[in-house]
Image (cartoon, rainbow, N blue to C red):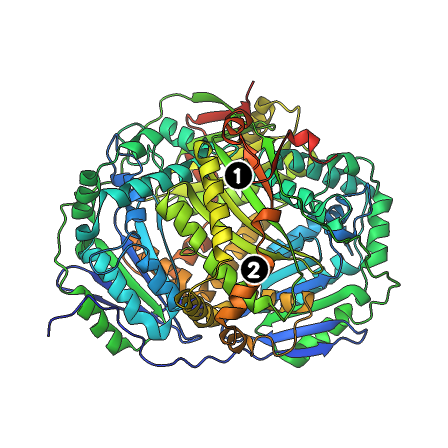
């Protein structure tokens, strides 16, 4: 589809920084988006959450930018900004009026190159307090908030890069030192471990000059060891029961599955939609709509660079036994493997995916993040059509095979029950 | 030449940005329609708005209008509930119904190629819903269970308790949109049908649409689907007496909490053109964004919270000001002290520098409020809801720039009243009892959630 074919320019500076530019002149806006190739996956035992804490520290100022001023400069220019940490990467981004592009480049280059001189114990202690509260608010004090952590620590073996939560364990958060933060920066935050994407309304020649002006004197650094995807075998089912501050019981089932952009990744995505993505999806229709055994159901394929898992989550209606829900899920999986799916179900999923691709082109900032995403996983920013075709090529047989390959293997079962 | 990094680069030149123009026309039966033509992508976003929300729920039938919004797409025209959803999904359309205190919105986002088909489905839902007993019973069971689930969420408890105790039970704005399971259990399908017949009509409707479609074709399609709709109808009524806020602190016990959800505030004058921009600037400085006084104090200075903010919350016919945050249990009373001291502080005035920053931030950010079709539609829903003047968007920046330091300082004294605030704390009662040993934030009252809505 021509609409999804995005023209771009890519250059690599001598210090290793990759730069990708895509113009879109609909509005006088520009988006700046940097991915550092480091995430939770690179953390060590006892230092969980360090990648995320580090992301917080990147907003605490750098040599030429006092604390709080990173936010203030961007906001004063009418921009918005944030960052996020995932298992595979950490990103930082700004969207601002196009005449302030240089401001964003100045700020991003200052913290890429000159972060350490402004690092203090006081800033670290403050952000440890903030992150502890982030953990309390979004995980410990949320109903079902510990589910992800309980699942991945039981599904992935301890040495696997995905066996720890991005937010980190409370004890680890409390124990980070200035040395931890300094070493993390020295190892991972360098131009040769980063990709800068600029999308929106800008002049191409001038912009490349601006990027060189601010980034070319930052020296390449870092001794990040390359990591390889790691396979593992879950030999038998793992069953966990967790008491929580809830009234409705919930069951989580998780199987090891394929990595991002692996051979079965797209088929598993579509399978998750066929199981739970719409009113007519199999599990929703049967368990929420018809039998009213479940209040809600969701299935999804989580996949990253170093691993993946397929999850199904169901909340029981009051008085319904979780084992009944579990039995229903396995019956449906068996049915899917044995009898396959209808052409209409496949069409429904594919059409929804196609629409979402087009809807996602509306924001210059999400476009920038998308380009970085494709560059990271596929080494080709202009991969919207490749990605859409990945889904279009899925046929009925591929879905049956993917279900059989992964969902008949040992799994982790996590039950949330009300605290006694 | 060596780069000097110590100074921030300045902007290159002034930007030109034209607010997108809009068309305003009426369908054959009088339905007001706003259309913003946006051509870059083959996307259309439409909202059909009904001037009826949960504030029109009758006494003892709280949750009725929400239940109608849940039932209305459970079968319509020639389709049952599952078939109807399938028709939308096969066309890759995203379709949703949203209800708040004031209005009900049926929203559709779809690729232009499927607009005609899905508009017809939307018309089926609005004009000829089945409202069957079987569907009604299923949706009622589902929302009743959903309310149980919401009651486990500390932020839901804090928000619903705050609005209930702020407005008091005499005021229709006090009640949660989803209602109460006890009320829901007494409803039957006729209640839902009657509510539909009373309020769903051309006379309570408006349409906002943004996207890639020719205006004349759009007019024809809308008229074909909605232009002949003629129903008798009522204008929704509701109770909205003036309420005085008493200075009180309500502690709602949530066992095993490790944080305290805090909401603190009071009623203010409803939205009006005269002080809207002054309040917007005031709140930007006080608690409206990351580098506001409240967030910098509670988060960046003290590390008590992941985030803290304040806002003026506008309903169509009422409004309130509040501060919201969630803090670790042991820091609750310290955080309260800082919040109250910021509220007292802002009444002593803001600085010229703060005001310049707020104006710059809001005016320069303005173009990004018009980026997507859904941005455009939600801007115009606001225009309809608050009856904003036609030049509202074009005069926005000028109106911001016209606010003076004196205006903001007067607005603070008039609209921020920490001594007349009510405060809700949702958390661990045992721990909070130890911290709340005086009435310095207001008289302290301990409640269980069950005792709240009586």
Q: Residues within 10 Å of mark 2 (few under 14, many from 20)?
A: some
- B203 left or right of A161? right
**Chain letter of the residue beneath label 2 in the structure image:** B
Image position, residue A371 (x, y; %) = 34, 60
Same chain letter for marks 1 and 2: yes
Which residue lies most toward the right here? B232
Pick the residue in front: B129 or B150.
B150
Please determine whether, in this image, residue B173 is positioned above or below residue A1.
above
* Disc 1/disc 2 C-alpha distance (Å): 27 Å
Q: Name the disc covering residue B413, or none.
A: 2
Please indicate whether residue B51 sits to the left or right of residue B194 in the image.
left
Badge 1 marks a residue whose secondary structure is: strand
Residue B261's tag is 1
- Picture quarter with the N terminus of chain A: bottom left
Q: Which label sits in the foreground, 1 or 2? A: 2
| Residue A156 visible in the picture | no
How far from the left and from the top, in percent, is residue B72?
A: 75, 51
Figure check: B444 above or below A380: above
Local secondary structure at mark 2: helix
Judged left or right of residue A343, residue A122 is left
């Amino acid at each position: 589809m021509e609409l999804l074919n995005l023209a771009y320019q890519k250059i690599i500076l001598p210090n290793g920084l990759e730069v990708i530019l895509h113009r879109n002149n609909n509005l006088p806006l520009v988006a700046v988006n940097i991915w550092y190739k480091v995430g939770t996956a690179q953390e060590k035992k006892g230092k969980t959450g360090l990648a995320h804490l580090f992301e917080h520290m990147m907003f605490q100022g750098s040599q030429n930018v006092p604390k709080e001023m990173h936010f203030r400069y961007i906001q004063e220019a009418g921009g918005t900004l944030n960052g996020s940490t995932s298992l595979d990467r950490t990103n930082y981004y700004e969207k601002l009026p196009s005449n302030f592009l240089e401001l964003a480049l100045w700020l991003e280059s200052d913290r890429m190159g000159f972060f350490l001189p402004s690092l203090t114990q006081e800033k670290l202690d403050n952000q440890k307090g903030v992150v502890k509260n982030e953990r309390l608010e979004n995980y410990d004090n949320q109903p079902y908030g510990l589910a992800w952590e309980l699942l991945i620590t039981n599904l992935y073996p301890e040495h696997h890069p995905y066996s720890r939560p991005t937010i980190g364990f409370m004890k680890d958060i409390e124990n980070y030192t200035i040395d931890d933060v300094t070493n993390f920066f020295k190892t991972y935050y360098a131009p040769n471990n980063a990709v800068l994407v600029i999308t929106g309304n800008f002049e191409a020649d001038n912009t490349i000059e601006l990027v060189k002006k601010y980034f070319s004197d930052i020296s390449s650094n870092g001794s990040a060891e390359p990591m390889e995807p790691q396979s593992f075998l879950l030999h038998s089912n793992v069953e966990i029961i967790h008491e929580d501050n809830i009234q409705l019981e919930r069951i989580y089932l998780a199987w090891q599955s394929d990595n991002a952009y692996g051979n079965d990744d797209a088929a598993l995505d579509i399978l998750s939609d066929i199981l739970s993505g719409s009113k007519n999806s199999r599990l929703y229709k049967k368990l929420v709509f018809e039998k009213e055994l479940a209040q809600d159901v969701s299935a999804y394929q989580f996949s990253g660079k170093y691993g993946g898992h397929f999850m199904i989550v169901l909340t029981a209606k009051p008085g319904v036994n979780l084992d009944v829900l579990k039995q229903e899920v396995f019956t449906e999986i068996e049915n899917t493997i044995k009898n396959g799916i209808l052409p209409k179900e496949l069409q429904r999923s594919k059409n929804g995916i196609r629409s979402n691709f087009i809807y996602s082109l509306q924001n210059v900032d999400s476009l920038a993040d998308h380009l970085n995403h494709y560059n990271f996983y596929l080494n080709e920013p202009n991969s919207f059509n490749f990605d859409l075709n990945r889904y279009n090529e899925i046929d009925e047989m591929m879905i049956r095979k993917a279900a059989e390959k992964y969902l008949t293997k040992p799994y982790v079962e996590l039950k949330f029950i009300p605290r006694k | 030449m060596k780069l000097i990094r110590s100074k921030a680069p300045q902007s290159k030149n002034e930007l030109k940005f034209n607010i997108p123009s809009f068309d305003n026309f009426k369908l054959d039966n009088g339905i007001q329609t706003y259309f913003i033509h946006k051509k870059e992508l083959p996307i259309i976003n439409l909202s059909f708005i009904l001037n009826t929300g949960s504030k029109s729920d009758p006494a003892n039938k709280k949750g009725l209008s929400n239940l109608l919004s849940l039932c209305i797409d459970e079968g319509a025209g020639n389709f049952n509930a599952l078939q109807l959803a399938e028709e939308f999904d096969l066309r890759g359309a995203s379709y949703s119904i949203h209800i708040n205190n004031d209005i009900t919105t049926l929203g559709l986002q779809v690729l232009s190629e499927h607009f005609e088909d899905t508009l017809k489905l939307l018309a089926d839902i609005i004009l000829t819903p089945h409202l069957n007993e079987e569907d009604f019973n299923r949706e009622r069971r589902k929302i009743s269970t959903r309310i149980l689930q919401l009651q486990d969420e500390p932020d839901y408890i804090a928000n619903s308790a705050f609005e209930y105790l702020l407005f008091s039970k005499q005021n229709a704005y006090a009640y949660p949109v989803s209602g109460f399971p006890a009320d829901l259990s007494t409803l039957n399908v006729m209640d839902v049908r009657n509510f539909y017949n009373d309020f769903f009509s051309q006379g309570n409707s408006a349409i906002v649409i943004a996207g890639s479609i020719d205006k004349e074709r759009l007019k024809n399609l809308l008229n074909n689907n909605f232009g002949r709709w003629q129903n008798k109808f009522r204008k929704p009524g509701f109770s909205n007496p003036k309420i005085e806020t008493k200075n009180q602190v309500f502690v709602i016990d949530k066992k095993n909490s490790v944080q305290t959800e805090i909401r603190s505030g009071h009623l203010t004058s409803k939205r009006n053109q005269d002080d809207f921009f002054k309040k917007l600037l005031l709140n930007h400085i006080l608690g409206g964004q990351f580098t506001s006084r409240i967030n910098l104090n509670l988060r960046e200075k003290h590390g008590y919270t992941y985030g803290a903010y304040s806002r003026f919350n506008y309903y169509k016919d009422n409004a309130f000001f509040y501060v919201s945050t969630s803090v670790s249990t042991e820091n609750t009373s310290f955080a309260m002290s800082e919040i109250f001291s910021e509220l007292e502080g802002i009444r002593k005035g803001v600085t010229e520098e703060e005001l310049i920053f707020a104006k710059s931030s809001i005016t320069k950010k303005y173009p990004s409020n018009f980026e997507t079709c859904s941005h455009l539609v939600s801007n115009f829903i606001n225009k309809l809801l608050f009856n904003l003047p036609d030049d509202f968007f074009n005069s926005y920046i000028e109106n911001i720039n016209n606010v003076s330091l004196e205006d903001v300082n007067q607005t603070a004294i008039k609209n921020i009243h920490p001594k007349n605030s009510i405060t809700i704390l949702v958390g661990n009662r045992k721990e909070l009892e130890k911290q709340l040993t005086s009435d310095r934030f207001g008289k302290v009252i301990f409640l269980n959630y069950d005792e709240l809505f009586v």
